[in-house]
Image (spheres, rainbow, N blue to C red):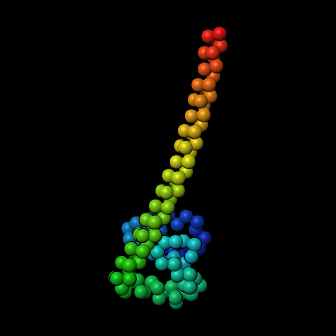
Amino acid sequence: MFPSVTDTQGLVLSEAALYRLPLITLDPRLPLGTTDATAMGDPAALASRMGALARDPLVRRRAGEQAWLSVYRMQERSRESLLSVVGAYARKSVVRDAQAQVGADRGAHRGDERIGT
């Protein structure tokens, strides 16, 4: 149960989800587990959701798997984004190095021509 609607990180959610624990979040901006925004301001709805998890092992297991899958997908997107940024930086470096080498080669050839004359 993660009742915060102001916590911007919620790292504890990711940690719990990696252990396949069922999650209930109230903030629809948190993409993990079961988001039950209807329970915001409605203690009876929240108690009902918590009771369903407490009573039914299959519901708990499904919610835990859903939470794990959400974190896994989020990590995959983060990994792909990071690799994209690193790849773009590496390509820029390669191009910059190649341009510098071409410039150096041109300068060396001009120097050779001057020496030969």
> In this view of the protein, which residue sits in the foreground, 92 or 25?
92
Residue 60: x %, y % from top left = 38, 80
Q: Residue at x 55, y 43 (%)?
A: 91
Residue farthest left in this picture: 57
In screen coordinates, is 103 left or right of 35? Answer: right
In this rendering, the answer to whether 29 lies above or below 36 is above
Residue farthest front in this picture: 117
> In this view of the protein, which residue sits in the foreground, 95 or 113?
113
Residue 16: x %, y % from top left = 42, 68
Q: On the rendered image, what quadrant is the C terminus found in?
A: top right
In this rendering, the answer to whether 7 lies above or below 53 is above
> In this view of the protein, which residue sits in the foreground, 94 or 117?
117
Q: Residue at x 48, y 56 (%)?
A: 79
Residue 29 in which image quadrant: bottom right
One can see residue 34 in this view: yes
In this rendering, the answer to whether 37 lies above or below 97 is below
